[in-house]
Image (spheres, rainbow, N blue to C red):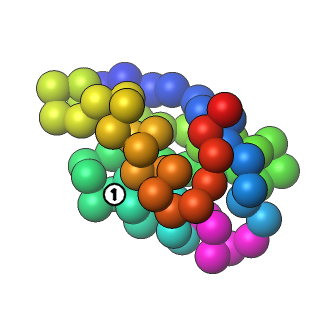
Amino acid sequence: MKNITLNVQGMSCQHCVNSIEGALKEIGASGKVNLKGESVDVSFDEQKVSLDRIKEVIEEQGYDVV
C-alpha cells in the first residue's frame, strides 16, 4: 500500500468529506479528508489504481488537486 497526502482546494463541509471519501472508496482507495489542512490522506494499491486516477476522481467531485 502506498500512502500520499494531496493538497485539495474547495472543501468546506461534511458533504465535501463524504463526496471525496466515497468516490475514493468506489475505485478501491482509502481517503481521509482534513478540512482545516485542505488535504486528503490517501492509501492505495498501485497495482489496482493510479495516482492520476485518484486525482481525476477528486476533481470529478468538483475540487482542485494542487
66, 42: nearer the viewer: 66
Residue 44, horizontal then vertical, whole percent: 32, 35
Q: Residue furthest right?
A: 36
Q: Is residue 64 left or right of residue 12?
A: left
> In the image, is residue 14 part of the stretch drawn in magenta?
yes
Q: Is residue 18 above or below residue 53?
A: below
Where are the magenta residues, as a range?
Answer: 13-17
- Residue 66 lies in quadrant: top right
- Residue 8 lies in quadrant: top right
- Residue 18 lies in quadrant: bottom right
Overall secondary structure of the magenta section: helix
Name the amino acid, label 1: Lys
> In the image, is residue 27 part of the stretch drawn in magenta?
no
40, 54: nearer the viewer: 54
- Identify the residue at image location x=29%, y=30%: 50
- Identify the residue at image location x=25%, y=49%: 28
Residue 43, horizontal then vertical, whole percent: 40, 36
48, 63: nearer the viewer: 63
Q: Is residue 21 left or right of residue 25?
A: right
Q: Is residue 38 above or below residue 19?
A: above
- Identify the residue at image location x=46%, y=39%: 55
For label 1, the residue is: 25
